[in-house]
């Protein structure tokens, strides 16, 4: 065997063994030769293993730490902070609640004529979470929907994207042709559904709109639809549908049953309502006027038998789809057809106030009903502080010697100037007492009728005039107030309600539209009892004197020639009030009949009538003729 001696350099080297095999002698020699060659060329020694730098290891540890921190933070956010919301969204994807349609309550008149119907309606809605995930596929579906609905695709996309709700109403009240096309293709349009709804269909919309009001899909309501919403409101049932991740149906369960809303029966006589509307429109056209209002009350209960405000509007436009042009036509109409003049309009009353002033004077025992005052058509009143200045107050005619009954029948201004403001040796009520008694009859405050947006009207007094106008109250203001002129404002409903105690012997009743609440099978749920606001505030004997004066107005006074021709005895008081526009008046009449046992109190007001003959008595005559001719039908 050959022996090799290792040089000192070789002895110092460490050889990293990568194999369990021994190194051959020739490999050692080659290694030495390679080392010499490296030295000749100036190349550094190559090693079999190179250790990692310390900084690299530290960076690696930092990176791992940051990565773990991010993962932990995201997990905390998803599990803890947003856990409930994400869980709810997951459940929403898995479980879908479908509503079972229920019927909203309807409304009947006193004879069970149905005034409202629930009509089927279909809407197209978009459930955003069910839209295709691929944007190109989503746009394709949106384009197809847009073509069917004939709308702009970009606007539809923007509407859906900007909606804050998961379900977006795309189109409501689909027409028949569009509905057929959508029903045929709806399975190919993921994310879109046809929703079954109902809309309110109002019988002869314009005739009852101010009374019944409307209900829109947006939730907006007016009239009885608003006042009795909680009674009429339906409660839909619910079906819980479970589906898998791919949207396949797993199960369905009915979680609650639908409950229909309750219905209303009104005091309203629909036939009377139509007759009042017809006669009022006829008279407005005849005299060239545009604004009128009428209300009829049952003096035994306060029930509203009819309520007409002209011009009117079609409430079906609100419950169904209304075009922008139709809305602009209603909203920009200077005559304000949406305004309910019966309960919200304030007007000076003219001589229609006189039975109330007479009642106050009798109750205060300021004058005997038999005492006569000489009316020569004018009285002269000196200025309160400058006697040289004389004010003249005129009557519409010379009445001669006049007692209270004649004063009411012939509407004598001089008589009521005297008992209202005082004249000569006759003491007057004065503004404070006048306001007190008008308030007792319900003027200057809401009647409490079960309709929204009722106005209070207005009763002036000296303190108001001083505070608001910076002027003192003159005797002339009291005179004007005594005959229903000046700052006074009353609604037609307040006028009718104030004559109810004169008709029934002393009970001021709250006007009431709804008579009964019934269920879907027309079984009584609740009866609305008449509510007495106050009674016995005027002695019945005093009210009887006023009644006799109103009866005399028909037999020999301002209503003669019209109401005396009726087949039943009636009592009445007319009035004409200056409006501030020269030669134009607001015309009033209030009637109750039959005289001995009143069944109806009717107030009619026609605004802005050219000065001339009184126009309301012939309207009242035509209405009452119809009413008593159809008495057997009630």
Image (tube, grey):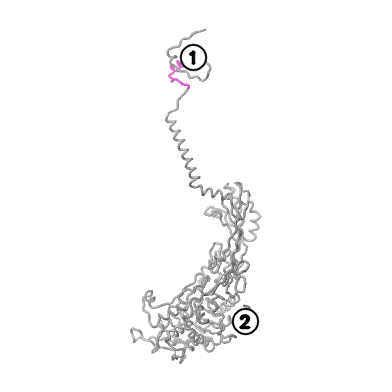
Regarding residue 142, the answer to whether it shows in the image is no
In the rendered image, which quarter contains the C terminus?
bottom right
- In the image, residue 216 above or below residue 603: above
Seen from the viewer's position, the closer of residues 293 and 138 is: 293
- Spot occupied by residue 621 in the image (x, y as percentages of width and height): 57, 83
Could you tell whether 264 is left or right of 582 in the image? right
Q: Nearer the viewer, residue 21 or 287?
A: 21
Please rate how many residues cluster around mark 1, counting C-alpha atoms within 10 Å: few if below 14, some from 14 to 19, many from 20: few
- Which tag is nearer the camera, tag 2 or tag 1? 2
Q: Callout 2 environment at 10 Å: few (<14), some (14 to 19), or many (20+)? A: few
SS at circle 2: helix
Q: Secondary structure at mark 1?
A: helix
Q: Position of residue 303 (x, y in %)?
A: 55, 75
In the image, residue 375 above or below residue 538: below
Of the numbered discs 2 and 1, the one sitting upstream in the chain is: 1
Q: In the image, 473: left or right of 348?
A: left
- What is the magenta segment's predominant secondary structure? helix
- The disc at residue 28 is 1
Badge count: 2
Magenta region: 23-48
Q: Is residue 395 magenta?
A: no
Q: Residue tagged by mark 2? A: 629
Q: CA distance from mark 2 to mark 1?
A: 139 Å
User: Is 394 placed above or below 181 here?
Assistant: below
């Amino acid at each position: 065997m050959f022996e090799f001696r290792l040089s000192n350099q070789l002895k110092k080297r460490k050889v990293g063994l990568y194999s369990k095999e021994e190194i051959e002698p020739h490999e050692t020699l080659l290694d030495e030769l390679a080392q010499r060659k490296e030295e000749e060329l100036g190349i550094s020694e190559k090693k079999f293993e190179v250790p990692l730098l310390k900084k690299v290891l530290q960076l690696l540890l930092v990176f791992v730490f940051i990565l773990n921190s991010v993962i932990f933070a995201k997990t905390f956010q998803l599990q803890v902070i947003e856990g409930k919301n994400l869980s709810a969204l997951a459940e929403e994807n898995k479980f879908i609640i479908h509503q079972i349609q229920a019927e909203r309550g309807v409304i009947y008149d006193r004879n069970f004529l149905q005034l409202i119907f629930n009509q089927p309606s279909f809407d197209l809605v978009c459930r955003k979470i069910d839209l295709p995930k691929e944007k190109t596929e989503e746009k394709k579906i949106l384009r197809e929907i847009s073509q069917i609905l004939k709308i702009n695709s970009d606007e539809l996309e923007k509407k859906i994207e900007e909606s804050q709700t998961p379900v977006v109403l795309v189109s409501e009240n689909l027409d028949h042709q569009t509905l057929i096309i959508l029903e045929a293709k709806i399975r190919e349009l993921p994310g879109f559904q046809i929703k079954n709804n109902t809309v309110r269909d109002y019988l002869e919309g314009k005739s009852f709109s101010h009374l019944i009001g409307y209900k829109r899909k947006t939730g907006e309501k007016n009239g009885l639809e608003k006042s009795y919403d909680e009674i009429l409101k339906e409660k839909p049932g619910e079906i819980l549908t479970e589906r898998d991740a791919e949207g396949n149906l797993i199960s369905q369960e009915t979680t609650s049953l639908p409950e229909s809303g309750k219905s209303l029966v009104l005091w309203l006589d629909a036939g009377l309502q139509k007759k009042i509307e017809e006669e009022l429109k006829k008279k407005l056209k005849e005299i060239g006027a545009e604004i009128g209002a009428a209300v009829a009350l049952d003096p035994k209960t306060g029930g509203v038998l009819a309520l007409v405000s002209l011009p009117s509007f079609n409430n079906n436009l609100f419950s169904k789809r209304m075009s922008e042009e139709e809305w602009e036509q209603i909203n920009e109409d200077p005559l304000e057809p949406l305004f309910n003049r019966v309960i919200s309009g304030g007007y000076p009353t003219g001589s229609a106030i006189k039975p109330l002033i007479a009642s106050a004077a009798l109750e205060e025992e300021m004058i005997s009903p038999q005492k006569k005052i000489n009316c020569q058509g004018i009285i002269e009143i000196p200025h309160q502080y400058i006697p040289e200045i004389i004010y003249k107050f005129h009557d519409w005619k010379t009445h001669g010697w006049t007692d209270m009954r004649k004063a009411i029948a012939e509407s004598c201004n001089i008589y009521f100037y005297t008992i209202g403001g005082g004249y000569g040796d006759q003491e007057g009520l004065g503004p404070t007492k006048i306001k007190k008694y008008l308030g007792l009859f319900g003027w200057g405050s809401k009647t409490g009728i079960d309709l929204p947006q009722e106005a209070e009207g207005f009763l002036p007094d000296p303190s108001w005039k001083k505070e608001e106008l910076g002027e003192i109250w003159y005797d002339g203001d009291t005179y004007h107030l005594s005959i229903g002129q000046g700052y006074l404002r009353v609604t037609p409903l307040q006028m009718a309600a104030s004559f109810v105690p004169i008709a029934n012997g002393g009970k001021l009743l709250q006007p009431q539209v709804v008579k009964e609440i019934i269920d879907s099978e027309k079984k009584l749920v609740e009866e609305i009892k008449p509510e007495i606001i106050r009674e016995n505030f005027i002695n019945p004997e005093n009210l009887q004197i006023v009644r006799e004066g109103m009866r005399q107005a028909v037999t020999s006074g301002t209503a003669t020639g019209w109401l005396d021709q009726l087949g039943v005895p009636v009592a009445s008081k007319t009035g004409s009030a200056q409006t501030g526009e020269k030669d134009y008046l607001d015309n009033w009449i209030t009637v109750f009949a039959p005289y001995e046992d009143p069944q109806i109190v009717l107030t009619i007001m026609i605004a802005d009538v050219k000065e001339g003959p009184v126009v309301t008595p012939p309207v009242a005559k035509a209405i009452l003729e119809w009413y008593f001719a159809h008495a057997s039908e009630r």
